[in-house]
Image (spheres, rainbow, N blue to C red):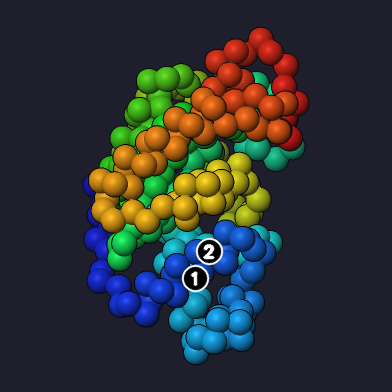
Amino acid sequence: MVYYEPKPISEFDLMLMEKIDELYTAYPFYGVPRITKYLNIIDKITVNHKKIGRLMANMGIQAVYPKKKWNLSKPNKQHQKFPYLLKGAHINYPDKVWGTDITYIRANKDWFYLVALIDWFSRYVISWRLSRSLSTDFCVLNLEQALKVNLPKIHNSDQGTQFTADGYIQTLQQYPDIKISMDGRGRCFDNIFTERLWRTVKYEEVYLKDYQSFDEALESLDIYFKFYNTIRLHSSLNDRTPERVYFQRSESVSSN
């Protein structure tokens, strides 16, 4: 397995990362220039675009419009890539497409890594896992957990190291009926359902809490995801919960 051990982050960079995270979550169309100007003019923080660009690259975020992709899950040129299979696809039943992605979760003066697998039709979070380091193994463990629930027709991810690693791909290839799809470079809308999930999790959970440790973040996120799946109503699901739509498959729901 490949591990990326986080380096100590300065107090200034921690503060900037929190500002960037909040700005990007509120305004996902903001890129490096706009975020830099906002911090300089509105927040009166003297910082140049190179530092903001570097931090955004490390955080795996980019403005939501086609452009060069800065990805938290960085590509490895040695790893096998798969074609994108979802162009024009109609997602009209559960388990047709699963999507996965990684995001940062802040806690006190640390940043942790959250991966999730979401069913695109029902928005049901099939599995999720929090990690102290950006490794391949926590993504593989999350995938193995999800595959105990059901099998998708198509598994979609970006081309990042964690999702193209041999361990991850080999886990998927144990199931010949699963087709592997990967976002092309610059295709920023391909994983939109997972991006919406991250926005929801941060506004409804992370930003309302002040996690002091990894264990506290883990416990609180566990409570939140149970709420998200089983209690929270989604207007896009005709005011049903993801759990209801995912498991009661005979019911008709409009898919966006």
Q: How many marks?
A: 2
- Quarter of the rendering occupied by the C terminus: top right
The quarter of the displayed image where residue 129 is located = top left
Residue named by callout 1: 19
Residue named by callout 2: 22
Point 64% across, 63% down: residue: 27
Q: Is residue 33 left or right of residue 141?
A: right
Q: Amino acid at mark 2?
A: Glu
Does the CB distance between marks 1 and 2 fall below 8 Å?
yes
How far across and how far down the image is residue 79, in percent? 39, 50
Task: State the residue in front, 221 or 68.
Answer: 221
How far across and how far down the image is residue 149, in percent? 42, 20
Point 47% across, 61% down: residue: 60
Dot 2 alpha-carbon crowd within 10 angstroms: few under 14, some 14 to 19, many 20 or more: some
Dot 1 alpha-carbon crowd within 10 angstroms: few under 14, some 14 to 19, many 20 or more: some
Helix, strand or loop at label 1? It is: helix
Q: Is residue 215 visible?
A: yes
How far across and how far down the image is residue 135, in percent? 29, 50
Helix, strand or loop at label 2? It is: helix
Q: Is residue 68 left or right of residue 149?
A: right
Task: State the residue in front, 13 or 220.
Answer: 220
Find the residue positioned furthest to the bottom: 46
Point 41% across, 27% down: residue: 146
Q: Amino acid at mark 1?
A: Lys
* 198 lies above or below 225: below
The quarter of the displayed image where residue 67 is located = bottom right
